[in-house]
Image (spheres, helix red, strand yellow):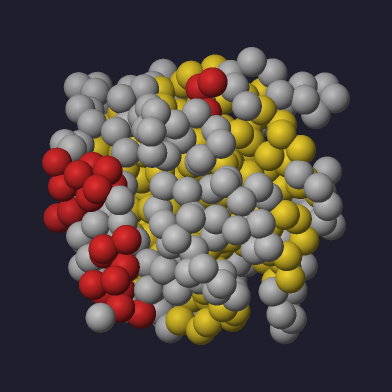
Amino acid sequence: MRRKILTSVLPAALLAAAVALPVAPASARPSSLSLTHARIAAHFDFAAGQMPENIALTPNGAADITFAGSRQVAHLARDGRTRVLATLPAPADGGVHTPALGFPLTTGIVRAHDGTRYVLYATGTSDLTGVWRLTPGGSPQRIAALPADSLPNGMALDERTGTLYIADSSLGTIWTVPSTGGSPTAWSSAPQLASTGFIGANGIKLHNGAVWASNLDRGTLLRIPIGPHGDAAPVETRATGLTGVDDFAFTGRGNQVLAALNGPNAVVLVNSDGTRSTMLTAADGLQNPSSVAVRGNTVYVLSAAYATATDPNLILASLGHTRP
């Protein structure tokens, strides 16, 4: 029953994207990197709402993740065992007014060096939507409210300045919030962040003095330099044609990123010049990939199975150089 309910609330736009869209055409230019030894390291329970949306790596090789459909924050041990850390409160109206999706969901997660987790929650209600903090051994607490009609999705943390950056998929805005809590500030509402009818700004990362964000509807990867006073400089479009792009992660090699293409069921490598090549597909076990993380030469890919409704999972792969 739970599986049927979750599938029924997904909008037709997402289902169509997952079923019908092809993988964005890859560049003919050979990639300098490869992903090998891909394997499914953990399976999750779709019927229980365990649709893994976002991931934050821990120092010991484990990970903290959000389960969108069950409103949960969980810890994933290195051996694949999952332990639920917290379940966020359900909205009184069931979350039917959550923008774009119509159900309440936990989305972005980041982890500070002291083990504090910051989690985004979208419910379509003003009393719950926003940034939640979960300290080790503590209970979740909302530290910043976001508009009820927002869809906070990806999040990045600058511990140096104590600033959280939040990609709002509904309002086409990047918000900033102090990590200590407080009122959000609209850092950028550039038109490149807006949706074209479904999901706009999605994944977000900090890299080399800039905020990088993806836009699912537009299939773009964007770079917004951070000005000398912390303000947002004009947006640069660094890649296009990334159909269904969700979260992404830098490989540690300049501006190269690995991006999850949710609907097309692929992970692609995007080079600094915007060219790209497909690295993982459904043949490797992907089920609507939603998040990517990189530590050293290990790549973590979460699949939420939003539309396939089959085997949400975590895939691990090894990142290496291809031979000339």
Residue 6, relative to residue 252: is it above or below? below
Residue 47: name its quadrant: bottom left
Decide if residue 185 is in sight here.
yes
Residue 173 locus on image (x, y percent): 61, 34
Residue nearest the observer in this picture, 286 or 18: 18
Q: Tally the numbered discs.
A: 0
Residue 161, relative to residue 226: is it above or below? below
For the N terminus, which image quadrant? Answer: bottom left
Residue nearest the observer in this picture, 320 or 104: 104
Image position of 300 (left or right of 161): left
Q: Residue at x 56, y 36 (%)?
A: 171
Residue 158: name its quadrant: top right
Residue 59, relative to residue 145: is it above or below? below
Residue 311 locus on image (x, y percent): 24, 70
Residue 251 locus on image (x, y percent): 47, 42
Q: Residue at x 52, y 28 (%)?
A: 193
Image position of 59 (left or right of 192): right
Residue 24, relative to residue 144: is it above or below? above
